[in-house]
C-alpha cells in the first residue's frame, strides 16, 4: 500500500492506493480518515485498485481555507478524481462520505460505474431529532443564559457545552474546531435526499442492523428513492461495519461488483 500526496486548490491532500484492476474510491465519514478503512482497503485490493482518500479537514489532509458546505466538497472531489485520472470508477461512501457520494453520483453519472452507500448521512430533518437531542437543544438555550451569570457562568460554560453535546450524541461537533466546526453545521443542516432519485448508476446500499447514527429507516427510504438499488442489512452491525466486520463488508462489496 502506497501513501500519496497531492495539492488541489492549495489544499494538501493525502490518500492511500493499493492493488491493481478496476478503480474503487473510498470516502470516509466525518471524523474518520483513510486509516479507518485500511483493513477493508487491504482486502479489496486483492481484486481492485483501491484508493482511500483523506477528505479536506481529516486525517493527513489540510483544513479547507474557508467554511465549506457539501457543494464545496463535491467540487473538490471532482478536481481530485480529475487530477489523479480516475474515470468510470466504483465509489464507496460511508456516513458523511456516503452523503457526498450520493450527491456526486447524481451530478456526475458518467464518471461512476457503481455506487456503494453504507450508513450514508443523507436525510436531515429537525422533526427527526431523538429525545436526547431535543433535551440537549433545550439545555443549550439554558446554557446561554447560564453563561451570563457573573463570575461563574463564563468560566464554566465551555465545560457545560461539551457535556450537552456529548449527551446529544454530537461529539463530532464538540470535537471540531475553527473552520471545521462551522463546516460541520453546514453539512448537518443540508438534506441530500433530493439527489437520490437522480442517481442512475447501479447502487448497493449496505446498512448496519443496529446503526444508531443513521437509523435503519434511512436505508429503506434510500432504496425506495434510488431506482433499481439493492439493499443488504448487516446483522449485529452498528454504524461502522468497516471497523467491526471488515471481512463481511468487503465480501459483500466484492460480490456486488463481481457477482
Image (cartoon, rainbow, N blue to C red):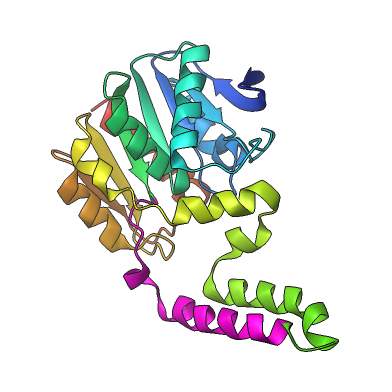
Front residue (pair 33, 122): 122
Check if residue 230 falls in the magenta segment.
no
Among the 4 quarters of the image, the one containing residue 198: top left
Helix, strand or loop for the magenta stretch, by majority: helix
Q: In the displayed structure, would residue 198 be above or below residue 79?
A: below
- Extreme-top residue of the structure: 85
> Is residue 133 something one can see in this rendering?
yes
- Extreme-right residue of the structure: 151
> Is residue 240 something one can see in this rendering?
no
Q: In the displayed structure, would residue 80 be above or below residue 152?
A: above
- Kindly identify the residue that appears in the image at 61 percent across and 22 percent down: 9
Front residue (pair 234, 219): 219
- Kindly identify the residue that appears in the image at 40 percent across and 62 percent down: 211
- The quadrant of the rendering that contains the C terminus is top left
Q: Position of residue 106 (x, y in %)?
A: 28, 33
- Region in magenta: 121-147
Q: Position of residue 214 (x, y in %)?
A: 39, 59
Check if residue 130 falls in the magenta segment.
yes
Among the 4 quarters of the image, the one containing residue 249: top left
Q: Left or right of 191: which side holds 200?
A: left
Q: Left or right of 120: which side holds 65?
A: right
Front residue (pair 167, 41): 167
Q: Left or right of 123: which side holds 152?
A: right
Q: Position of residue 138 (x, y in %)?
A: 51, 83
Among the 4 quarters of the image, the one containing residue 24: top left
Amino acid at each position: 500500500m502506497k501513501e500519496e500526496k497531492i495539492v488541489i486548490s492549495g489544499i494538501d491532500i493525502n490518500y492511500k492506493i493499493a492493488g491493481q484492476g478496476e478503480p474503487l474510491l473510498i470516502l470516509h465519514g466525518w471524523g474518520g480518515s483513510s486509516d479507518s478503512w485500511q483493513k477493508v482497503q487491504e482486502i479489496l485490493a486483492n481484486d481492485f485498485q483501491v484508493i482511500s482518500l483523506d477528505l479536506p479537514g481529516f486525517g493527513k489532509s489540510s483544513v479547507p481555507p474557508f467554511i465549506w458546505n457539501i457543494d464545496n466538497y463535491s467540487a473538490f472531489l471532482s478536481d481530485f478524481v480529475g487530477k489523479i485520472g480516475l474515470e468510470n470508477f466504483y465509489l464507496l461512501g460511508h456516513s458523511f462520505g456516503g452523503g457526498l457520494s450520493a450527491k456526486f453520483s447524481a451530478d456526475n453519472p458518467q464518471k461512476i460505474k457503481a455506487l456503494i452507500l453504507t450508513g450514508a448521512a443523507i436525510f436531515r430533518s429537525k422533526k427527526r431529532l431523538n429525545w436526547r437531542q431535543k433535551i440537549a437543544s433545550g439545555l443549550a438555550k439554558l446554557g446561554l443564559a447560564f453563561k451570563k451569570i457573573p463570575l461563574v457562568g463564563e468560566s464554566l460554560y465551555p465545560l457545560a457545552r461539551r457535556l450537552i453535546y456529548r449527551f446529544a450524541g454530537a461529539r463530532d461537533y464538540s470535537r471540531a474546531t475553527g473552520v471545521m466546526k462551522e463546516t460541520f453545521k453546514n453539512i448537518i443542516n443540508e438534506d441530500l435526499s433530493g439527489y437520490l432519485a437522480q442517481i442512475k448508476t447501479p447502487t448497493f446500499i449496505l446498512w448496519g442492523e443496529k446503526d444508531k447514527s443513521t437509523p435503519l429507516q434511512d436505508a429503506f427510504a434510500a432504496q425506495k428513492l434510488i431506482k433499481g438499488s439493492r439493499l443488504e442489512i448487516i446483522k449485529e452491525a452498528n454504524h461502522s461495519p468497516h471497523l467491526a466486520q471488515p471481512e463481511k463488508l468487503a465480501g459483500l462489496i466484492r460480490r456486488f461488483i463481481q457477482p
